[in-house]
Amino acid sequence: AQKITQTQPGMFVQEKEAVTLDCTYDTSDQSYGLFWYKQPSSGEMIFLIYQGSYDEQNATEGRYSLNFQKARKSANLVISASQLGDSAMYFCAMTASNYQLIWGAGTKLIIKP
Amino acid sequence: DAGVIQSPRHEVTEMGQEVTLRCKPISGHNSLFWYRQTMMRGLELLIYFNNNVPIDDSGMPEDRFSAKMPNASFSTLKIQPSEPRDSAVYFCASTLAGVFSYEQYFGPGTRLTVT
């Protein structure tokens, strides 16, 4: 069965440091997609970044990059030069059948000034 | 371009009352999802529509919950009768299924409190 695992319930990071949020996945599909979403305290769910299983290069979007290691089935989110506004819940998700997404439990990131 | 629109943003109701949540997906998107989020259970998919047709409603908790999508630009989630355990944030999301990178775009959510 498809599954997403986020092993870090919470993280504290000093402002301006880089952050890595872990995500591992399990699937028998050859073709799949991986996503990261941010949910700040205001509650909205914000799409951050996408990685396709056949993409040879790691996806990047501004300060966000996705460290995709296919053999290890990991899709870690890296945030460079963290800012106070990065404090939020972060969810990893994966494509499933019928265009649905399988979601991880999330990691609560707190950036310390 | 407007994002996913949900109304109301907040709803407080008494147990036993009917609650209707509304969603307008992004224009051109052909798939719509209703989610429920609570601290205890996280993000749960309730029902998914593709081209206005319900594809998977296995996440709908019980018969008190129903969802409709009469056209491509409108969907409702109804709870009748409501119970305190239905208190949660309900999200609507839409996507363009058929292209592989089908990221879902979420509405702002409806915070439902049932007393």
Image (spheres, coloured by chain):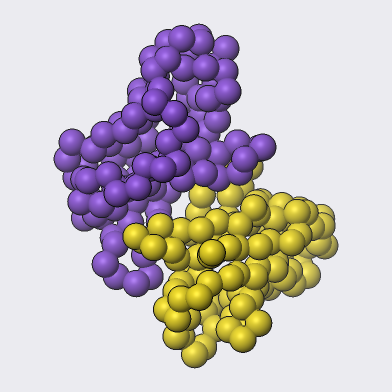
Q: Nearer the viewer, residue A57 or B84?
A: B84
The C terminus of chain B: image quadrant: top right
Q: Along the horizontal axis of the image, is B88 left or right of A11?
A: left
Give the mark count. 0
Q: Along the horizontal axis of the image, is A111 left or right of B67?
A: right
Q: From this view, report whether residue B79 is shown above or below residue B107.
A: above
- Give residue B46's position: percent from left, percent from top: 43, 40
Q: Along the horizontal axis of the image, is A11 left or right of B101?
A: right
- Give residue A59's position: percent from left, percent from top: 52, 79
- Give residue B22's position: percent from left, percent from top: 33, 31
Q: From this view, report whether residue B108 is shown above or below residue A4.
A: above
- Give residue B93's position: percent from left, percent from top: 39, 47
Identify the colour of chain B in the image.
Answer: purple
In the rendered image, the residue lying farthest to the bottom is A56
Q: Along the horizontal axis of the image, is B70 left or right of A9?
A: left
Q: Which chain is yellow?
A: A
Q: Is residue B50 visible?
A: yes
Q: Is residue A42 visible?
A: no
Q: At 42% from the left edge and 78% from the top edge, which residue is drawn?
A: A31
Q: Nearer the viewer, residue B113 or A48?
A: B113
